[in-house]
Amino acid sequence: MYRFLSALIALSSLQACGGECDFAHSMCGAQASGDVVIGILMPCHHKVTALDKRIRPESYHCSDFHLPSFMRSLAVIHEIEEINAAGFLPGVRLGYMMCDTCSFASTALQNVEYMLAVNRSLNVDCDYSDFRPRVKIILGARYSEVSIAVARLLSVYMIPLLSSTSSAQDLSDKRRYPSFLRTIPSDKHQTKALGQVMHHFGWNWVGVVYGDDEYGIAAFQSFLKDAEKNSVCLNYKEVLPDNLDNSQRLSRIKQIAERIRSSTARVVLLILKAELVEALFEEMIRTNTSRTWIASDAWSRSRSISQMEGINKDPQEQNDDHLVTALDTSDAFLHRLAVWATANALKKLLKCNGSSCLGEINFPPWKLLEELKKVQFEFENSSFIFDKNGDFEDCYNLIVWKKDGDHRRFLKIGNYHVLDKQIRLVKKDFIWFSTANTTIPQSRCSERCAPGSFKKILNASCCHNCTLCAAGTFSAEWDLDTCQRCPNGTWSLKGWTQCKQREESFLRWSDPLPIILMAAAVFGILLLLVTFIIFLVNRNSPPMKRAEVRLSCVMMAGLSVSFASVIWFMGRPNVHLCRARQVMYALGFTLCMSCVLVKAFRTFLAFLPFGQLTSRRLHKLYKPLVIVIVITSLQGVICLLWLIFDSPDIDDTPPSPQSMTLVIQCSEGHTYIGFGIMLSFIALLALVGFLLAFKGRKVPQEFSETGNIIFSMLMYLFVWVCFIPVYIMNNESGTTVQASAILVSSYGIIFCHFSPKCYQVLWKSNTETLEKILNKWRAISSPKHDVVTEINIDFPRVTLSSEKTQKSDSFITSSTSPKLCSSGTLCISSYTTLVTKRKMARTRSISC
């Protein structure tokens, strides 16, 4: 670098850029003769003075010398000299003509006219196919606005314009700019990269300041589309005109600075020329305003901006060392690349080999354009080729301005590849200036929505409230616009970040509660078996005779079926189990209840006084076997109709949205009518038995089981009255509740009916005589009735002595011959003996 700068500064042809026109020398700043001349159209100055006062077509006056642009021009000249020295084009020397555009399109057009003039004139022709100017290609210009104007003109002659900095998207349109090419990607890729950078760092609330030139307007419009795709919103957009004089520009910059300071956006994108950015930063530094600035390619590596505080560019006072230390020489790479692209296209066009070039040197420029579009070459270990739009599709470097003393230096942190449209960070743990650590600065309208929530948009797409995902939906990423529905039968609760399979809930065999219920059912069956053995062994004892062993055994059988039905409540239910368990319970418990009803009815008939006619009619109804069969059969018919018209099945009711448990249980039909009738029928039996027993509650327990029946029926009714509301209100626990109700009601009958009899047989004396029993009955019975209906009660034979009968003038003695006939009816005989004082008392033995 030192060598080429020293050589260039020493060139005698180097003159001050711009200046007055002197056709005796040159309208442009520097030139060198050659067989093929390359035009260099670069700005050495920032602007043209007094444009608003110009009324005559006189020469332009340039000001504000720009050293970085001048350095790029020198790099192009140096590369041309390197190619000549290397003999890359044998026998052909490249010349150049460098002109200063002064960053103004009209000046650039004036320079182009000079470059293309033949004998100081530019003739007008109908066909320029054979137009052969001395300049065959022009390298430049720097700004897109200037390139657009020049490309319009050069498209008339099809002279190639090869730029290394003009990135406006419009220049890719080959219908309007057919002769334009560039060694950088189009701005359409730059704005995509900018949008992705903001999305990558989580900045969705930004401000934009852009210039009113072709480059700024086109880049801003393109950025709007890419910002929307990356969920980036604009808090404000401000335009900074380039053609204002100093006072107007300062006023506008202050307005923009105030807008930036008052905004909540902490990130600002500047699509401006470097000199405008520099002017804006002076105001920001003056007011001590800090933001995260996003640079477009126009100023991203501006050394003048990064070292603003110490800048001073009288160039006559600078030396080579200053040029190297004050400028970023890597900026020249793309310009050097343009020279090598031109040289490789010329080598193909001029048919050069290792020793000579055989082609015509004074060729029409359009032939070089044709070869440029097809050229493919290697430069510094990389391969380059133009695409169909005349653009290089390479990559953008992502750089941050790192603090370096009082200034900044450039640090590459990654790149954006144009072809795959992906950002790759090569350095992640870099220090951010605004946070003084690796924490990424924030610039958002609203806080980010964490996984499990979604954005509820307010007045702008980036301003939102975070709302938790509803049950059945989820969000697994940050800042999602909507929550996704759970797939494939999975589910989620409110605010979840993923969906899961619902846990199936049923009474598993291995769970504690089912084990307890099964143990209770098995224990109940064993208890009935023990009771059955006790009843069978002691069947001839008075307590067992009074308990009607055969009826009691039938009750035990029904209760055993009822206990067994509880076992089918366990395990994973299926349609067959759902039906079997209800039918088993219904028939088993109905069989038991029918026997209880027979016992209550027997006591009711035997000991309650009725008229003779009523008594006989009621006696005819007492047929135990028929009663048991009819009642059980009625329940069977109910169950059959239930199974036919509204059969139990697997419950298909969807679980609660706020539950992750899928209850697998039986449904007792769609309408529950059959289930209700079945339970109501058993409840009716229990109620009738309770009423009959309650009517005979004063009968001595030695003759009846009214107390046992009352308590067992009350227990049953209480259990099932409690069961119904619990079952309805807590449907998910219906299986457990019903199984528990069956067990409690079944145990109630065991302890109320069978346990007292077993206790009497095993531990209580049975010496009580019939006389004592009758005395008890006489004490509680009414003396008004002269007829007592006698019912066959099974107790031991006793004899009443005549002495007992003589204590009263007259009395009624009722005796019973207790016998259960083979037909299943109760043998009843009524005996009435009138004993008077005149007759001898007669003793009658009471026997079966």
Image (cartoon, helix red, strand yellow):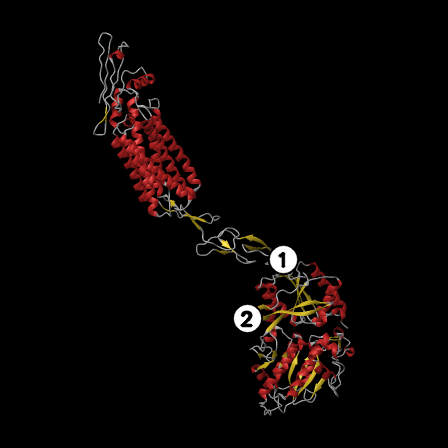
Q: Give the secondary structure at mark 1.
A: loop
Q: Amino acid at mark 1?
A: Cys
Q: Is residue 602 visible?
A: yes
Residue labelled with disc 1:
445
Q: Give the secondary structure at mark 2.
A: loop
Q: Are marks 2 and 1 in contact (CB under 8 Å)?
A: no
Q: Is residue 751 left or right of residue 47?
A: left
Query: x, y percentage for residue 152?
Result: 63, 79
* Disc 1 residue crowd, few under 14, some 14–19, many 20+, Cα 10 Å: many
Quadrant housing the N terminus: bottom right
Indicate which label's residue lies in the foreground, 2 or 1.
2
Q: Is residue 29 visible?
A: no
What is the total number of numbered labels drawn onto the structure image?
2
Residue labelled with disc 2:
420
User: Which of the 4 image quadrants contains residue 320?
Assistant: bottom right
Q: 470 or 356, which lies in front?
A: 356
Q: 19 or 131, which lies in front?
A: 19
* Alpha carbons under labels 2 and 1: distance apart: 30 Å
User: Which of the 4 image quadrants contains residue 748?
Assistant: top left
Q: Residue at x 22, y 9 (%)?
A: 840
Vertical comparison of 393 with 132: above or below: above
In the displayed image of the protein, which residue is found farthest to the right?
A: 317
Query: x, y percentage for residue 246?
Result: 76, 69
Q: Is residue 798 left or right of residue 724?
A: left
Q: Amino acid at mark 2?
A: Asp
